[in-house]
Amino acid sequence: MALFSSTIDQLHNGLDGAELRQNTTANNIANADTPNYKAKKANFEHMLDDARRQFDAQKTDGRHVDFSEGDREAYTSVDRSRSYNHNGNSVDMDKEMAEMANNQIYQSALVDRMDGQFGNLKTALGGQ
Amino acid sequence: MALFDGMNATASALTAQRLRMDTASGNMANASATRGDMVDGEWEPYRRKMVTMAPQENQPSFASHLENAERENTEGVQVTGIVEDQTPFQTMHQPGHPDADEDGNVQLPNVDPLKEMVDVMGATRSYEANVTVFDAHKAMKMNAMEIGRG
């Protein structure tokens, strides 16, 4: 039996994702005045979705794309279609700031839950 | 070190914005400096300077460019140089001026205070935004330190 439940793994994924998102936002805002810079977006939610990972499907050809997204790590994507600035820059400062505030709350919630998990373990171990 | 990557990215932006501010200050200070450079034994007025920036790549290699096509690989911003504005100098008729030519015209720097003010405002706002990001980053890291304490 595993000592740590899968919840901790999930929270771990979430925290990693929150950090990636924070770094991506930091990079976007750092490059808010850089000509032709295109804003990037952190994608990690697919790692939190267990159900999709267990999607039951058969590959009949080696060239088929994987059905499950679970194996794919967190990644960032670039949206080249938009430009908010005359110099080809696509950083939307309001969006980035809102995203960062969201991410901060999200991360704080995860930390709180993670703390709760360890608290439970501690209680179970009789450590207080 | 991965722990401080985001903070370093923000720090690079703070430095870049500060340089932008300094450059604008220099332009403003020299807005009427008629003796900027000595060219062929003659004084040329001060030329307006501008900061150019580019995203900072981790390793500027072929592989990293390939990787950049999909994955994020930039760590902040870098100043690629300070370029001089090549727009023509302003001329003003001022016969008594020591740098006036035979017709009494003086060449003045191509500095437009209005442009500089816009640049100063932009740099200030960007700097503030990056300070906010830095604070957020710090708060998140400190928050993560609390795991397992309570």
Image (cartoon, coloured by chain):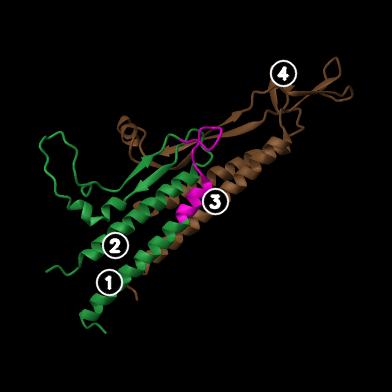
Chain colours: A green, B brown
Chain holding disc 4 = B
Q: Amino acid at mark 4?
A: Gly
Residue at mark 2: A11
- Gap between marks 3 and 4 measured at Cα: 46 Å
Q: Are marks 2 and 3 on the same chain?
A: no
Chain under numbered label 3: B
> Answer yes or no: do the residues labelled 1 and 2 have beta carbons within 8 Å?
yes
- Residue for point 39% across, 51% down: A21
The residue type indicated by label 1 comes to Gln
Report helix, strand or loop for mark 1.
helix
Residue assigned mark 3: B129
Q: Do callouts 1 and 4 point to residues on the same chain?
A: no
Crowding near pointer 1: few (<14 within 10 Å), some, many (20+)? some
Q: Which residue is mark 1?
A: A117
Q: Nearer the viewer, mark 3 or mark 4?
A: 3
Q: Position of residue B28 (x, y in %)?
A: 71, 38
Question: Looking at the image, which residue is at 55% across and 36% down?
Answer: A85
Picture quadrant where residue A59 is located: top left
Secondary structure category for the residue under label 4: loop
Eye-nearest disc, 2 or 3: 2
Q: Residues under labels 1 and 4: Cα distance? A: 77 Å
Which chain does the residue under circle 2 lie in? A
Q: Mark 1 or mark 2, which has the lower sequence index?
A: 2
Q: Is residue A85 left or right of residue B145?
A: right
Give above or below for A104 relative to A127: above
Residue B41 has which mark? 4
Q: Viewer-proximal residue, B118 or B54?
A: B118
